[in-house]
Amino acid sequence: MFRPFMMAALIALPAIAGAQSAPVADTAGSGKPPQRVRAVTLGVGQKCPQSTEDEIVVCSTLDQPYRIPKQFRDSGPIPAKNQAWGNRAATMDQVGRAAGGLPDTCSPVGSGGQSGCALATNRQWAAERRAKQDADAAVP
């Protein structure tokens, strides 16, 4: 049903596009478009060069061109009220898990807390062993 309309639109598209006139760029009132566009990267304290009638000069600074301004930079952890719901739920789940004495939590409260203490001790021992091996490997 739409095929004939689509074919007619595709056939008419070049004719419609050719009928449009291109906008005329007016440079300094001369009526002719600029012949050259020049991009200049400036260092600290440099001035942007003046453009002429037949060129456009685009200037950018070199010192931290893509850096976020200091007033908008990250100043620490994101407050909970600004976090996604999933992150807040995961944090509450982890806190509730440790406080509730669930298995593998190393908590004196609840029946499953003792299994987590052995697990935490084993993890600490493995981390200390890895650190010792790394320190021994670093010695020339």
Image (cartoon, rainbow, N blue to C red):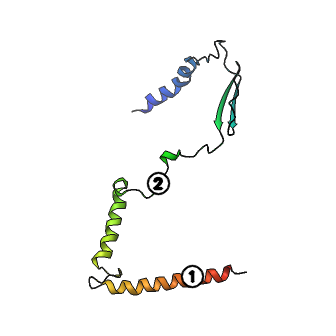
Q: Quadrant of the C terminus?
A: bottom right
Callout 2, which amino acid?
Ser
Q: Residues within 10 Å of mark 2 (few under 14, many from 20)?
A: few
Q: Residue furthest front?
A: 45
Return the residue at label 1: 130
- Residue 31 position, x and y percent, is 65, 12
Secondary structure at badge 2 equals loop
Q: Quadrant of residue 30?
A: top right
Residue at horizontal 55 percent and vertical 17 percent from the top: 19
- Residue 87 position, x and y percent, is 37, 61
Q: Which badge, 2 or 1, is on the more N-terminal residue?
A: 2
Callout 1, which amino acid?
Arg
Q: Quadrant of the N terminus?
A: top left
Q: Which dot marks residue 75?
A: 2
- Foreground pick, 55 / 7: 55
Distance between the Cα atoms at labels 2 and 1? Answer: 33 Å
